[in-house]
Image: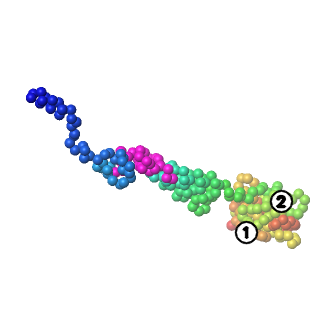
Amino acid sequence: MRLLLLLLALLLCACPVRRSGNNDDPPDEGTRAGDCADGADNDGDGFFDCDDQGCWGSPDCAGDDDDSTGDDDDATGDDDDATGDDDDATGDDDDATGDDDDATGDDDDSTAGDDDDATGDDDDSTVGDDDDSTEPPLPAGTCQPVTGVLTCGSTVQGDTSLAGVDDVIDLYPCSTNNEQGPEIAYELLTPNEEDVTLYLTAFGVWELDLFLLEETGGGCQASDCLQYGNYYIDFTALAGQTYYVVVDGFSGWAGAYELEVTCAAR
């Protein structure tokens, strides 16, 4: 009898013991097909689909940016992080940093007043500035050697068609006329402040024009033009300031003229 009881006890010890409730626990998320895309918390741990550690690495969870690393680790062509940079390959600027970090050659940010591409054009919204190199240069040119000096009461005669009188300046910033004729220049100096009138008379059918230039340190330069007149100019000359008076030919005209200077004290 004792032997029988001993054998029975040995048989009971050899049988596997089940832990209470384990048979009823669901399997971990991601162990069955569709677990990571069904919108359910299949293992009851409070985490759904791709948020559950069991789905990390699942094909259902590839192609989105579901971490907090600050980079874009998908291939969707958009920038779904908040790092403020453009880390896709779409060729556009889809952040809000205020700079243009793509290679499209245009300025597609909202920063007014800057041109941050290399296209050579001005594509910002700032009115009145030109921040590229397309602006035409200012009219340039140095007058012919100054013929003589004018003073108040002077009357001089000249002829732009004579040999040795050349066309050096064709455009002045104070006029839109095409001055392709040869020109003669004079120096004008008033020791006192004066109201000055320059009066030009052309002896023929040719059209000659008058230009008043100011000495700014570079001599008689077209870029220093103050006034233009068909046949006369009125202006106030400052005491001790040097001016230049240029007789030029409109559209290539050349010929004889007379130039008169009258002054009235201020």
- Residue 156 appears in view: no
Q: Where is residue 75 in the image (x, y as percent from the top left)?
A: 50, 50
Q: What number is the disc on residue 263?
A: none
Identify which amino acid the numbered label 1 is placed on: Asp
106 relative position to 154: left or right: left
14 relative position to 198: left or right: left
Identify the element where label 1 is drawn: strand
Identify which amino acid the numbered label 2 is placed on: Asp
187 relative position to 118: left or right: right
240 relative position to 122: left or right: right
- Give the residue drawn at x 72%, y 64%: 174
Tell whether position 125 is magenta.
no
- Give the residue drawn at x 81%, y 67%: 250
Q: Where is residue 124 in the image (x, y as percent from the top left)?
A: 58, 59
- Give the residue drawn at x 65%, y 55%: 120
Note whether 237 is above or below 72 in the view shown.
Answer: below
- Residue 21 appears in view: yes
Tell whether position 52 is magenta.
yes
Q: Which secondary structure type mostly characterizes the magenta part of the structure? A: loop
Give the Cα separation between the discs numbered 1 and 2.
25 Å
Identify the element where label 2 is drawn: loop
Nearest the camera: 82 or 45?
Answer: 45
On-image quarter of the C terminus: bottom right
> Which residue lies under the disc numbered 2?
167
Residue 5: quadrant of the picture: top left
Residue 176: quadrant of the picture: bottom right
Q: Start and end of the magenta stretch?
A: 48-77
> Which residue lies under the disc numbered 1?
234
Q: Which sits earlier in the primary sequence, circle 1 or circle 2?
A: 2
Q: Position of residue 36 (x, y in %)?
A: 38, 50
| Residue reaching furthest to the bottom | 205
